[in-house]
Amino acid sequence: MNTVRTIIFIAIIALLALGFYYVSQQAGPNVVTGTVSYMEDVPLPPNSVVEMRLLNVSLIDVESQVLSEQTIYPNGKNMPLPFSLKYRASNIDASSTYSVAARVLVNGSLAWVTTQTYPVITNGYPMTAEVYMTDVR
């Protein structure tokens, strides 16, 4: 009888461990990667900061929900620059739409910004994006 209880106990522990592993995989980080650039053939000015965001853009007339952010300090590097936006899979709804947005601040003032959407993750879109910005100065 003790042997049966021991086997049942071990089986329950194994199932719990498997369940925790499954949940951790579902809630673990995923990544959208790519490059960000602009069409102008000019170097980034000194003191430039590139801000990348992964957004839920599903709702109209509502501010997009930010799922992930990355700040890039180019330190003299020119475009294109690589980015990597980590997010939790548990925050993704297959029926929602997600997009990558970018902007460049120079000395705190907006200089370049995305003017179109770069869809990712759901609805057959990839996990990568080549993001282009427009000069707004």
Image (cartoon, rainbow, N blue to C red):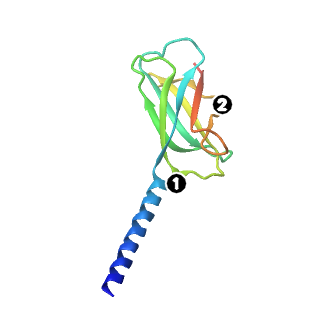
- Image mark for residue 116: 2
Which quarter of the picture shows residue 107?
A: top left
How many labels sit on residues? 2
- What x and y, as percent, mark residue 111? 54, 21
Query: Mark 2 or mark 1, which is nearer to you?
Result: 1
Q: Mark 2 packing: few (<14 Cα in 10 Å), some, or many (20+)?
A: few
- What x and y, as percent, mark residue 2? 31, 85
Which quarter of the picture shows residue 120?
A: top right
- What x and y, as percent, mark residue 117? 64, 34
At label 2, the amino acid type is Gln
Location of mark 1 (residue): 90
At label 1, the amino acid type is Ser
Along the line of sight, the residue nearer the viewer: 116 or 13:
13
Along the line of sight, the residue nearer the viewer: 67 or 85:
85
Marks 2/1: CA–CA distance: 26 Å
Q: Mark 1 packing: few (<14 Cα in 10 Å), some, or many (20+)?
A: some
Residue 24, above or below 13 = above
